[in-house]
Image: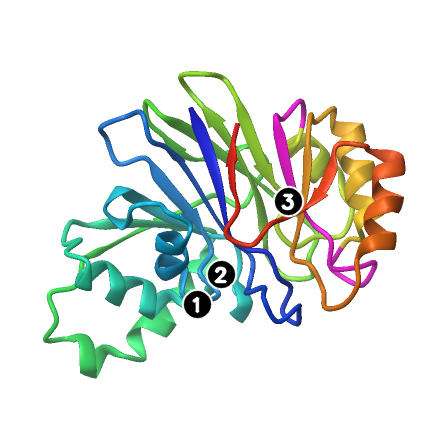
């Protein structure tokens, strides 16, 4: 059964109890490593543990884009893998601009970490084009599409191979057709709702995308600071199966 964990649900400035938006998908029924993480703008592995998932089950990390609230925790991610005894190679997937940023951040600590037996990093560059295949194994087929955020950025679609169930993630984006295609007939669409500003979307715009895509359920993340009741109600008028993402929430799909 596919599972989504929301390791963080906040925007760059958000409520005190929310950290930067980070996700993980997994399948606890397989004996193979099946947890794929998305972004590391905070302490991603600690949040994974808080959510009740295993660090040892991490199979790879996807980095969507180069903004600090999505990738600045990369050195800590690698350090924590090492301290948790994860010594095998770790795949890190993303478009060139995102991968260049995480490599620079890791290099900044090279004088300290050169003596550490940290996992080797398997950098896997993803084509910056629609329906680029990022990952394909017996558990997950993962594809991506460029979205509209002002810098190179991708949304991600996870297809759970055994069940055919789909989890889609818009990442940070203005309304665009790419998000509709990512969320096409998805069991769950995770969509940012920072607000109707440059490079971002409002809760209503997320609901419009979910409706157009034919998704079954919409979870709002990348949430700004302050009250969100009115925005949520407005979104639910368009797409009733809309809810705010729960920090450290587990969603069985």
Residue carrying label 2: 97
Residue range highlighted in magenta: 184-200
* Near-viewer residue (52 or 235): 52
Magenta: predominant secondary structure element?
loop
Residue carrying label 3: 170
Q: Position of residue 207 (x, y in %)?
A: 80, 39
Q: In which quarter of the image is residue 73?
A: bottom left
How far apart, in angstroms, are the residues tagged by discs 2 and 3?
18 Å
Q: Residue at x 63, y 61 (%)?
A: 151
Callout 2 touching callout 1 (CB < 8 Å): yes
Badge 2: residue crowd in 10 Å (few <14, some 14–19, many ≥20): some
Is residue 155 placed above or below 102 in the rendered structure?
above
Is 197 a magenta residue? Answer: yes
Which quadrant holds the N terminus? top left
Indicate left or right for 82 with 100 as reference: left
Query: In this view, which residue lies farthest toward the bottom?
Result: 111
Indicate left or right for 238 with 33 as reference: right
* First reached walking from the N terminus: tag 3 or tag 1: 1
Q: Which residue is drawn at 69% across and 39% down?
A: 179
* First reached walking from the N terminus: tag 2 or tag 3: 2
Asked which secondary structure carries label 3, the reply is: loop
* Near-viewer residue (71 or 207): 207
């Amino acid at each position: 059964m596919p599972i989504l964990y929301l390791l963080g649900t906040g925007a760059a400035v958000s409520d005190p109890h929310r950290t930067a938006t980070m996700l993980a998908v997994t399948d606890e029924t397989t004996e193979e490593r099946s947890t794929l993480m998305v972004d590391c703008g905070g302490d991603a592995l600690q949040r994974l543990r808080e959510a009740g998932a295993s660090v040892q089950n991490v199979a790879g990390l996807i980095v969507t884009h180069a903004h600090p609230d999505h990738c600045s925790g990369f050195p800590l991610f690698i350090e924590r893998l090492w301290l948790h005894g994860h010594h095998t190679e770790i795949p890190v997937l993303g478009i060139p601009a995102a991968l260049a940023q995480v490599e620079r951040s890791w290099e900044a600590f090279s004088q300290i970490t050169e003596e550490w037996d940290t996992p080797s990093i398997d950098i896997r560059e993803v084509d910056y084009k629609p329906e680029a295949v990022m990952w394909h194994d017996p558990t997950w087929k993962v594809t991506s599409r460029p979205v509209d955020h002002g810098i190179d950025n991708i949304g991600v679609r996870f297809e759970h191979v055994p069940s055919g169930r789909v989890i889609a993630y818009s990442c940070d984006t203005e309304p665009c057709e790419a998000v509709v295609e990512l969320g096409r007939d998805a069991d769950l669409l995770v969509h940012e709702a920072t607000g109707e500003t440059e490079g971002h979307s409002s809760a209503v715009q997320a609901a419009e995308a979910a409706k157009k895509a034919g998704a079954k359920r919409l979870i709002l993340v990348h949430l700004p600071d302050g009250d969100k009741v009115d925005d949520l109600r407005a979104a639910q008028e368009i797409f009733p199966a809309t809810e705010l993402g729960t920090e450290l929430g587990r969603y069985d799909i």
